[in-house]
Amino acid sequence: MIRNLTKRLLTNNHSNINNINNINRFGSIKIRSFYSTINNTTSTTTENKNTIENDENNVINILKKRGFIHQMTASDIEMITMTSTNKTTTNDKNNNSNNNNNNNNNNNNNNRVSLYAGFDPTADSLHIGNLLTLMVMLHFKRHGHNPIALMGGATALIGDPSGKSTDRVMLTEEFIEGNLKHIRENITAVLGEDTLVVNNIEWNKSMDVITFLREVGSYFRVGSMIKKDFIQNRLSDSNENGISFTEFCYSLFQANDFAHLFLKHGCSIQIGGSDQWGNITAGCDLIKKKLKGNAQGITIPLLTNSAGKKLGKSEGNSIWLSPHRTSPYKFYQYWIQVSDEDVERLLKLFTLLPLEEISRLVEKHNENPHLRLGQKTIAEHVTRLIHGQKGVEEALNTTELLFGESSKLLTPNASTTKVGDFDIGYLLSRVNFIELDRSKFVDNQTETILNLFSQVSDTSKSKVKQLLQSKSIYLNNIPVTSNSQFIQSSDLIANDFIYLKSGKKIYYLIKFT
């Protein structure tokens, strides 16, 4: 550092050398003037560093404040500098002037970076865990960066061993191909139609084994690969199945994807879940060794609730982003049911509300938590993000039909067959319902409502009789008064449904087919 500063002093202050006031009796620049320049330069550098590090508009700072970041492959200041979209300083311009002006020297476009995350099409929909990754990409996009969504048409054929104790089931090409359309729809619903979406089958399908081993495998050492946590977990004494060679090589394919995107699109950051750390660092290493480039990675924490349980499941079933897997109503209701302790964290992660507004909202929520203001805000914002305003309206109208004033329409003789712009039959078909044989239960005097309620509620008949005697069981919001009462065709709502209820919260929607 001293050597560089001396060189700059002698170059930039040539005229001062001839000034007798700046020359001591040994013929050198006065030491006081020299160190004054050093102190001024150091002060400016420190000031610039503090300015960058405290930049509240930087995407890294925002992600950290919202709780998105688990690990990064570089320091905070390095990542903040890398993603800073502020105008570069004179020193930055001078430092960058020696770089090659191509896409691989990543941040020449005013530090607007390209980043990517991968989504393996192992199902015909993404889920809430994937949504967390999409939210990180959305924040980057809102700050002027370029997110790239990679669909793993090739890697899904191999199977990611991360977080798994046994080999994944081998999927067929036809199955994966059928899933890709839905995955793309999930991605563009959040990030927009203008987002670059690629499929890694495009550059992997024509790569032969020899090319893969020479162009990718030669840059990795087995000893280092075995030390990866996800490999160690599969090689432990407690795991009798070990790991297949196929899954052992998975991280090499993912690393090659990163290198491909780096080379073709100038992609310099990979985003992934905390279980992807080993795969991400493998990509960073390959880019450094093979392409002499600089790439970084960011991992996201596992999505858990305040009790430490993994979020994204309801009654053991995943909450999906595609409406054919999880309807807007079910999706909305999932968020309505989250605990008060999780409200603030989920508002930060799954909405784009400013942090100051979230603080005020949480304070207001805590004053009357039974009103579930926080949960309703989360549910409405996330449902709109995934399903649009129509999805929000469908969810709210279904909620109103089942639990609000519109529940009086749950009768065959209702004055209207619509709630808002939606047919009642359509709304009911989007709710969790029990499907039963019409011929067995409808217009069959031997199959009473007592028997039916006992079956669907898994309640003893003696208990059901007590509920009947106290008029606590309702058929289409009308109390059941007789042990011998049975379902008639005239009881069916929208030709197919009945609504059995006990108390305020226990209900069963039954569809007869």
Image (cartoon, rainbow, N blue to C red):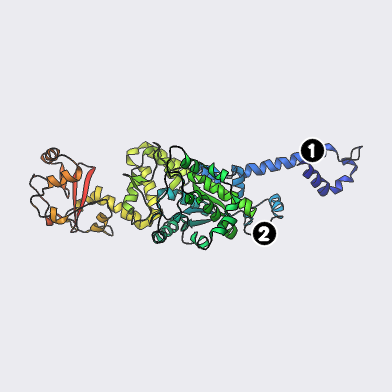
Q: Residue at x 9, y 53 (%)?
A: 444
Is 270 left or right of 347, judged from the image as shown?
Answer: right
Report the side of 490 relative to 379 (left or right). Answer: left
Q: Nearer the viewer, residue 504 or 496?
A: 496
Image quarter hosting the C terminus: bottom left
Instruction: Name the quadrant of the N terminus.
Output: top right
- Residue 252 x, y percent position in the rendering: 54, 52
Q: Give 184 or 260, whichever is nearer the viewer.
A: 260
Relative to the observer, which residue lies in front, 252 or 316? Answer: 252
- Residue 144 visible to an observer of this rendering: no
> In this orientation, which residue lies closer to the viewer: 250 or 6?
250
What's the amino acid at mark 1? Tyr
Q: Position of residue 385 (x, y in %)?
A: 41, 54
Precedes in sequence: disc 1 or disc 2: 1
Which residue occupies 43% across, 37% down?
Answer: 238
Residue 122: quarter of image: bottom left
Identified by mark 2, the residue type is Asn
Identify the secondary structure beneath mark 2. Answer: loop
Q: Position of residue 292 (x, y in %)?
A: 65, 53
Mark-to-mark CA distance, 1 and 2: 36 Å
Query: Are the residues tagged 1 and 2 within 8 Å (C-beta)?
Result: no
- Horizontal side of 147 relative to 128 (left or right) equals right
Q: According to the image, label 2 marks what residue?
A: 101
Q: Which mark is residue 35?
A: 1
412 horizontally vs 6: left or right: left
